[in-house]
Image (spheres, rainbow, N blue to C red):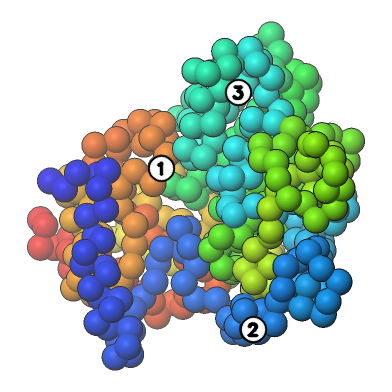
Amino acid sequence: MIPLYKNSTLAVGTARLRADFPKGVHVIYLDNAATTLKKPDGVARAVADAIGSFGGPGRGSHAAAFAASMAVFEARSAVAGLLGAPDASRVSFTMNATMALNIAIAGLLPDGGRAVTTAASHNSVLRPLFRARDMRGAQVEVARILPDGSLDWESYERALEGGANLVATTHASNVTGDVYDVARMASMAHDAGALFVLDAAQTAGAMPVDMAALGVDVLCFTGHKSLFGPQGTGGLIIREGLEVVPLLEGGSGVHSFDERQPSFMPEALEAGTENAHGLAGLAAGVEYVAQKAPAAIAAQVAGLVERFERGLASVPGIVVYGGHASFGRSGIVAFNIGDADSGEVSARLDADFGICTRPGAHCAPLMHKALGTAEQGVVRASFSSFNTQAEVDAALEAVASIAHRAS
């Protein structure tokens, strides 16, 4: 068996990308939960234009600096409008959701404080919490996820007993795609005296997300998944009246004689020069999502997921995980073929059929323990609005072929 904690498909996948893409070989890309490969045409154009015309955003009064500043402002406004921010100034950009979550958790959880999460959380939530436990004396409670992928509400309620300072959790599992009732979770967190931090890496752009309507205090997002932006873009949105202690301090372009980072948003959490080139691309991706409408994207992707899962049900030996949360799925189907190693199956899908999936642990160890897949991992197929029914059918044929050979 191939170890789960090594990327068993790296060498094969790199060879395919180098050899096949220039020749025009069609690759079916079903790894959108990691990063979307197919982007709206405007994203590449925006980045290319920015590379040749941007100076430092907020770092000068000349035209090139102003162009960069305007691009950052437009990206900030676009994200705020899409995700229900109270004001564009409450959006601070980071390099990804991981950095945003680290900023939120380190800046809101006091030394010796009490935090709650769930077993569905990604390591971008778990590791900052466990670091706070190990280095700052925080207490961390983890609510159970049931074997079917749903949240154990009694466990969550027990974790909140006695109060908490912070709840940090995921909107949708990056393993199964299960979308959780975070409005209910946020309400319970607030009743316990806790702030509510949401990891929306899998849902921002993939479905309607309104942080105010959900009762979220801090929403963390990434640009390179369903917002269709470049890698190296993301951020966090802070509700009005809440201050987050900066994780980083440095240049801000304003108040240069202050000894500490400015306390006002968004500069408080944006030390250093923003990725204006990437944010120009992010703004174009968000524009595509807004024009198409998140609800329409969610419905389209849900149809692909349903078609794929229905097809898998007819293949002997296939086990599908999750799909039991009351709020649906976020474009993901996680499955295994009997007891075959997920890395081997994913490698065969790539090498023999040109189908890109992701195997293994997906940086979500507690979720795999809940599902009983800690040793085997799962094969994750994840869809975007650029996938087609024909691609779903081709993937089903490939999985059936591998399952037949494995039987």
Q: In this orientation, which residue lies closer to the viewer: 5 or 309? A: 5
Residue 234 visible in the shown view? yes
How much space separates mark 2 and mark 1, taking CA atoms? 36 Å
**In the rendered structure, which amino acid carries the disc numbered 3?**
Val
Question: Of helix, strand and loop, which one carries label 2?
Answer: loop
Callout 2, which amino acid? Gly
- All told, the count of numbered labels is 3
What is the distance, in whole Å, between disc 3 and disc 1 at their CAs?
19 Å
- Sequence-wise, the earlier of marks 3 and 1 is 3
> Is the C-beta separation of discs 2 and 3 under 8 Å?
no
Question: How dense is the environment of label 1, judged by Cα within 10 Å: few (below 14), some, or many (20 and up)?
Answer: some
| x, y percent for residue 142 | 52, 23
Point out the frontmost of discs 2 and 3: 2
| Residue carrying label 2 | 52
Q: Nearer the viewer, residue 349 or 94?
A: 94
380 shown above or below 283: above
| Residue tagged 1 | 363
Marks 3,1: beta carbons within 8 A:
no
Kindly identify which residue carries mark 3. Answer: 116
Of the residues shown, which amino acid type is indicated by label 1?
Cys
Q: Which residue shows up at 84% across the image and 34% down it? A: 242
Q: Nearer the viewer, mark 2 or mark 1?
A: 2
Quick check: 313 left or right of 84?
left
- Splitting the image into 4 quarters, where does residue 157 fall? top right
